[in-house]
Amino acid sequence: MKKIFLLFTLSIFVFACKNSEEKTVDNTAETEDSANYVPSKMYKGEFIYMADAAVLKGDTYIFGVKMDEMAAKLGERVAPIKTDEFDMVPVIVKGTVSHKEKDQEGWDQILTITEILEVSPVPAKADVKIEDKKS
């Protein structure tokens, strides 16, 4: 009886050690890549693009937009839709949000657009309309 118990305990110990060795696989490269990976999220809001700045204003956020190739491409797509220089156009984009660098001016959070999903065919209605009254 003692021999069976000893054999049973020894076999459990051997199999348990074998399983733990299989689980300790070196995934250093995978861990480093996943640490730097930031998934794109979808953002819906009103977009305005000017020569030196771009902004996306949603219901609960306002992001400065990184001035890169994708922002310029979106700016080209909204340009014919705008009736005024300051018109905002509803868009849906995918992108990643990061904090601005301390020595830069502008919005605290910067959206880097990764994909343009949809552009509205009409500009957004202005929240406040300023009229110039001429006498």
Image (cartoon, grey):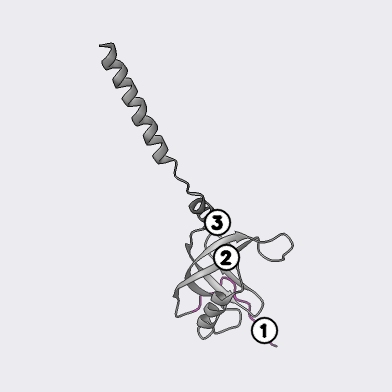
Residue 89, x across and y down, in percent: 51, 76
Disc 2 residue crowd, few under 14, some 14–19, many 20+, Cα 10 Å:
many
Tell me if residue 107 is in the magenta stretch.
no
Tell me if residue 125 is in the magenta stretch.
yes
The amino acid pointed to by label 1 is Lys
Residue 49 lies in quadrant: bottom right
Residue 105 lies in quadrant: bottom right
Q: Is residue 88 visible?
A: no
The amino acid pointed to by label 3 is Asn
**Circle 1 or circle 2, nearest the eye:** 2
Helix, strand or loop at label 1? It is: loop
Magenta highlight range:
123-135
Q: Is residue 25 above or below residue 5?
A: below
Q: Is residue 80 left or right of residue 132?
A: left
Q: Is residue 4 above or below residue 84?
A: above
Q: Residue drawn 60% across and 79% down?
A: 86
CB under 8 Å between discs 3 and 1: no
Residue that mark 1 sits on: 133
Residue that mark 2 sits on: 111
The amino acid pointed to by label 2 is Leu
Of 53 and 128, the residue lying toward us = 53
Residue that mark 3 sits on: 36
Residue 116, x across and y down, in percent: 47, 73
Q: Cα distance, mark 1 to mark 2?
A: 38 Å
Q: Cα distance, mark 3 to mark 1?
A: 54 Å
Helix, strand or loop at label 2? It is: strand
